[in-house]
Amino acid sequence: MGQQVLNGIFVGSIYALFAVGYTLVFGVLDILNLAHQAVFMLSAFFALVLVEHGLSIWLALPLGIVFGGLLGIGLERIAFRPLRGRAGSNLSGLISSIAMATVFEAIAAQIFGPDISRFPQGTFPDRMISLGSASASLLQVCIVGLSVLLMAVLTFLLAKTRLGRSIRAVAENPRAARVLGIDVDKVIALSFFLSSALAGAAGVLFGLAFNSISPDVGRSVELKGLAVIILGGMGSVPGAVLAGFAIGLVEVFTVAYAGSTYRDAVSFAVLFVVLVARPRGLFGQVAVREA
Amino acid sequence: MKRALLLVAFALGFACKDQGTNAPKQEGQAPSAASSSGGAVIGAALSLTGPAASYGAQQKAGIQAALADLPVKLDIRIEDDASTKEQGITVFQKFINRDQVSAIIGPTLSNTASAADPLAQQSKVPVLAVSNTAATGITDIGNYIWRDSLMEKQVIPGAFKKAQEKLHFKTAGVLYGNDDVFTKAGYDVMQKALADLQVKVISTQTFAKPDRDYNAQLTALIGGKPDVLVVSALADNAAAIVAQARQLGWKGAILGGNGFNSPAFIKNAGAAAEGVMVGTSWNSLSQDAANQKFLAAMQKTGVNPDQFSAQAYSGVLILAEAIKQSGGKTSREDIEAGLGKVKDLDTPLGKFSFTPERDAQHEPSVQQVKDGKFQIVQ
């Protein structure tokens, strides 16, 4: 039981990290960036290549995160900015992000092949920590800790810094923000950087945690991420965090007590019920949208 | 990508098996044909590229090693089936119509075989499968389809029995992939084998091929405190499952299905693979003359032999024996008739015969991962 809770928190922290970035872009732009999962995947591969070239994971992880962020800036430039301001740009942006995801996946398949790639043995120190009746590896503890830390940093950034205020202003009303002297394009690009950096972090951590990276590794997480941001309330960062952990736990208990066949069914059934009972999601109610 | 994964899965599922009975010797050198009449033309459809390429490479080496000292002259033409049904069909058509072969070896994957073998059956060309392990869709295609590779249901019961003699387990926790024909079929066989051994299954859990996280299932299984974990999974999933089980503190034995039967499994699972037991159709340690001869021949090719090269090598011996049985005649009908007379042939797999259903019949063995390598459990 205790162990299952740990398992849930563990996988939930990765979902949350992934979804927080997802929801950030949605909050700012009202656009679903479906290439988020591809950034997640490419960053994992990037860190893998660094590790294979002898870099410590402690260096490869931050570099992977930065790499994800830079991909995000490129993504915004190519897939979203040219469409901005056109009629129906939300929908066309969605489509072009799918196109970018396909391109990224094809690149990964070309370079790394369709098979599962893995971090070399001993990339991360192999230590077990026992917590009462349950046990967790050092890696799992670090992943949960790091996820929480990153999400806390983001929350702080949004709430207390100048950049955070700009992001929230753009989210609220881009035109008004521009009138107030905010460089909207820059803020959007920075939002993409932050969002994609978080996807990158989630990707590298996922790759480490389950030791399997393949060009389509992001797909299942993408669906989970969508469920998380809808459950948490579209655009709400704290909502995404909570919903991430919630879905992780629901999933683990479903698998353990009902069988893996029902894993997604139960997760999405919970989502459905929440949407019927509370259409805006857990945290979507607030009048002022959080970035 | 999904498709590629699927293919790999198929490859792994199918490919593995066969281990030999202890082969006693047969009178008359195994492969001997009467006077070679210019050499029978045999086609070999092997997966030299694509997801099953690693198996195909082993098979090619095995065939070449067998040809080196065969008393009969065989003209074996190797073509690449690219691990796909489509290419497999093309290669079969070429063999049957253009090359006018007397018999066909292969194809590597059961998946390909189920599509290509019907062509040979129609044209009455004998096919000897040397790695197909699917229970259905191979030899049941028709009377011209034969195989020297054991099916999972032939390997697992024997393997489990030997494992129990060694480990004395009485209870088990079972984990299997329920979205894949081969892991599911493997599970069915395992379940029956465990019941026959009167092992109590404490709990059963499932997963799907795209899954990466098995912590929930493994925690539940380990919570039941079974004596052993029994897992039916393809190599990629298997490596992750074993690694995560060890991470959750599981120190007991793990019995695997055929999907584990791959060096890739050991490579990917690393230290976690130690102690994992798997059934296999080739006993690399067999001291039988036929096996020793095979090992020596393989050494010359520079390829480290595995089950696949052993099965391919045996396939050539079996065809040569079939030609010998039919008095050295090499027409399609002669080889077909000769195959029916192959009995207790000495091969690296052990004493080899066909069942009435034209499937392989010989004793499987058990291997265990020790020091990063599969080693036969005596």
Image: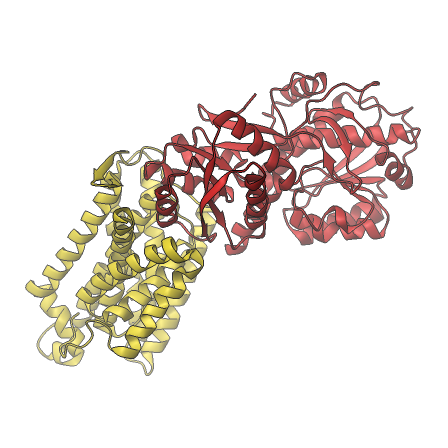
Left or right: residue B133 versus residue A213 is right
Quadrant the C terminus of chain B occupies: top right
Front residue of B40/B227: it is B227
The residue lying toward the viewer, choosing from B224 and A217, is: B224
* Between B366 and B134, the one nearer to me in the picture: B366
Residue found 24% across the figure and 56% down from its top? A198
A264 sits to left or right of B70 = left
Residue B156, position as x, y percentages in the image: 59, 37
Whole-percent x and y of residue A55? 28, 36
Taking depth in this image into account, of B252 and B39 the one nearest to the observer is: B252
Q: Give the chain coloured yellow.
A: A
Q: Is residue B284 above or below residue A214?
A: above
From the top left corner, tell me how far across and down residue B294 is, in percent: 68, 21
Give the chain coloured red.
B
Residue that sits furthest to the bottom in the current view: A87
Which residue is found at the position 24% from the left and 68% from the top? A232
> At 13% across and 56% down in the image, what residue appears?
A153
Residue B137 in view (yes/no): yes
